[in-house]
Amino acid sequence: MKIKRSALLSVIAILLITNIVTLVLWGKGNKSLSGTDAASETVATVGDEVVSREDWLHRLEKKYGEQELKALVNQKVMEKVAKDNGIEISKEQIDQEYELIQSVYNTYDQKMVLDEDAVRKQLKAELMLEEYLTKDVKVKEEDMLSYYEENEKLYQIPTMYKLAQITVLTKEDSDQVITELENGSSFKVLAMEHSVDKQSSALGGEIGYIPVNSGYLSKEAIKELESLDNGEWTNPVAVDDHYVIYRLEGKTKEKHYSFDEVKRQIRRQIALEQLETPVQPEDFWEEVGVEWFYGKKQ
């Protein structure tokens, strides 16, 4: 599988860090301290001992801060390099790369739901780097066409559903959840309170984009989802010895990219394979004048 391999690996490497740090800092910025500060606010107690928000944030910054900041710096670096070299990345290019990645990468199987905005920003940085590295590389038309014909199935995108779910043990439990939803309760809150799937319940039920041909969704679930609009939920679906209620967050239609539509991506892919020395955004730091909290570039 050669579709955006480098971008995919980079995205996976930073997303968990991004989600953890963003969640914590969002909570810090939106929670009123009522006259107290982070040093005195308690986030946990163990007997008579307390854990302060300051200690918690310090631990997160120490463990994840450098990696998260480096990802943000690299995005800015590639924006500057691209601008200085007249390289522009369109929304259509990012949309295409995002769809191709989602079609071959089941986020739920990887035990995390990708943050779409973070993915798109990282993809844009990757595309800028690749366009810069390959701008002077010549690739023959016949080589690109041959690549497309050999890998055409990779450019066939199945229907994909962006979903959240609530998994419960009994039909009675699922009926109770449906009743609460119909009475106006939040799907995310109910997922966190009632779902026995700890992985998705911690994320308010979010499980990301699921291709219809992934084998994850049953025929019954797919039939239920086909008739839904965004924000609506299914009837309880029996899955093994559980019952699952799915909420439709979004949908991408089946698509088959033509050669002309992916020609630019294929050119980059072939051109990158001709480069002898790998290049990372950090290699441009001195050129663009990066200074950061952690001193010299590692």
Image (cartoon, helix red, strand yellow):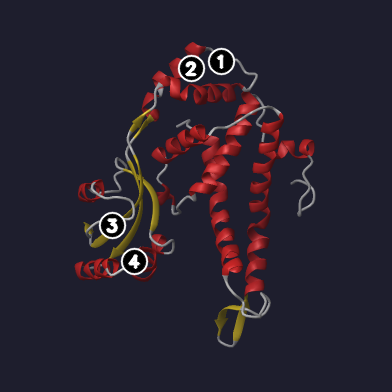
**For the residue carrying disc 1, how many other residues have a C-alpha within 10 Å: few (<14), some (14-19), or many (20+)?**
some
Measure how far apart labels 2 and 3 are at the Cα level.
43 Å
- Residue 159, position in %: x, y? 32, 39
Looking at marks 2 and 3 on the same chain, the residue that comes earlier in the sequence is marked by 2
Answer left or right for 285 relative to 124: right
Do residues under tags 2 and 1 come within 8 Å of each other at their CB atoms? yes
Kind of residue sitting beneath label 3: Trp
Kind of residue sitting beneath label 4: Ser
Is 109 or 259 nearer to us in this picture?
259
- Give the residue number, with chain letter if any, for mark 4: 195
Kind of residue sitting beneath label 1: Val
Q: Quadrant of the N terminus?
A: top left
Measure how far apart labels 2 and 1 are at the Cα level.
7 Å
Figure quadrant of residue 173: bottom left
Q: Is residue 289 visible?
A: yes
Q: Secondary structure at mark 1?
A: loop
**For the residue carrying disc 2, how many other residues have a C-alpha within 10 Å: few (<14), some (14-19), or many (20+)?**
many
Q: Looking at the rendered structure, which numbered label has been put on residue 233?
A: 3
Measure how far apart labels 1 and 4 are at the Cα level.
52 Å
Is 21 or 91 nearer to us in this picture?
91
Kind of residue sitting beneath label 2: Met
- Does 266 sit above or below residue 78? above
